[in-house]
Amino acid sequence: MHQLSISNINHMIKNITVIGSGTMGNGIAHTFAQNGFKVSLVDISSESLAKGLQTITSNLDRQIKKGAIEENIKTTTLGNITTYTDLKEGAANADLVVEAATENREIKLNLFKQLSEICSADVILASNTSSISITQIAAVTKKPQNVIGMHFMNPVPVMRLVEVIRGYATTDEVTHTIMDLSKKLEKDPVEVNDYPGFVANRILMPMINEAVYTLHEGVAGVEEIDTVMKLGMAHPMGPLQLADFIGLDVCLAILKVLYDGFGNQKYAPCPLLVNMVTAGHLGVKSGDGFYKYTTGNKELTVAGKFKS
């Protein structure tokens, strides 16, 4: 079979489809659009897409206020984004698809199966999954060699790391292409292999889980735990605040993947985390987690349940 050269693949990547307009999806769309790519942003509802575009607009305004970009860059960036509620229409002309849907295995497998039918034979299908097996995702497609992980960090326009995850069948050509493309986005790509949690979350989530256990067992309070890690370990944000920022439901989902993948008790989610998610206390997105979040209030206050 004739293999496309790396340079040819790079040359072909002009049209990007991003699936999901939530926190990660709108950040990925923003980043590609600001770097001159044509972006099709796909979500299941017009309301979600409008919210995503509003977030992108607000983030661009913030960049202008900081002097990072000029007003014309905002206009060009927004002009590079077209929204769709129909997956087939939004992905039909894609050279690269980046999936940023909910961190749910079944949803992702269903999407990639559909994309394999909709897209051209040479399209690269990437997932922004933070923990789910790229090999498993690739297995439902017609060309698993063209499937790869492209794990951006939040907030995407600011954070430089892209974790590039090779599935079992991912080719060198596709890997090199995504590494090179990430650099064109002014990111720092790091290539890793496909094991539960990859590198970032295999290390981060047990730390967050241990912080929740430390709170659960009464060793210290929310602010005390976060202060120790910020001042003692030079972390810019404490692990409990970071968990709120990521989303407690997302943290729980990743820990379950780690626990299922390794079968090791050290990855078992803390019962407090499970209860908080069950109660709908998900962190920033719900307004209540380990801390309380109210619109326009920049002062961080501990959630009522955890006040001493």
Image (cartoon, grey):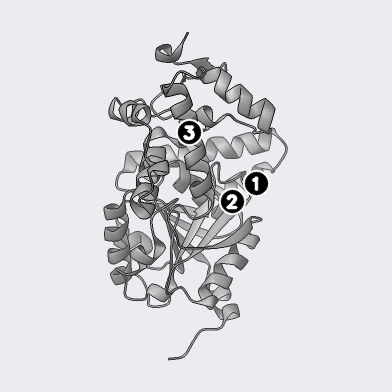
Could you say where residue 39 lies in the image, as x and y percent from the top left? 48, 57
Kindly identify the residue that appears in the image at 70 percent across and 34 percent down: 66
Measured in 3D between alpha carbons, the distance from the residue under mark 3 to the one under mark 2, in whole angstroms, is 44 Å
Residue type for callout 2: Thr
Is label 3 or label 2 in front? Answer: 3
Question: Measured from the top left, where is residue 188 in percent x and y?
Answer: 65, 56
Asked where in the image residue 71 lies, by quadrant, the reply is top right
The residue under label 1 is which amino acid type? Asn
Give the labeled residue for mark 3: 210
Please give the label number shown on residue 72.
Answer: 1
Q: Crowding near pointer 1: few (<14 within 10 Å), some, many (20+)?
A: few
10 Å crowding of disc 2: few (<14), some (14-19), many (20+): some
Closest to the observer, 77 or 278: 278
Disc 2 on helix, strand or loop? helix
The residue indicated by pointer 2 is: 76
Q: Amino acid at mark 3?
A: Glu
Q: Is residue 227 above or below residue 209?
A: above
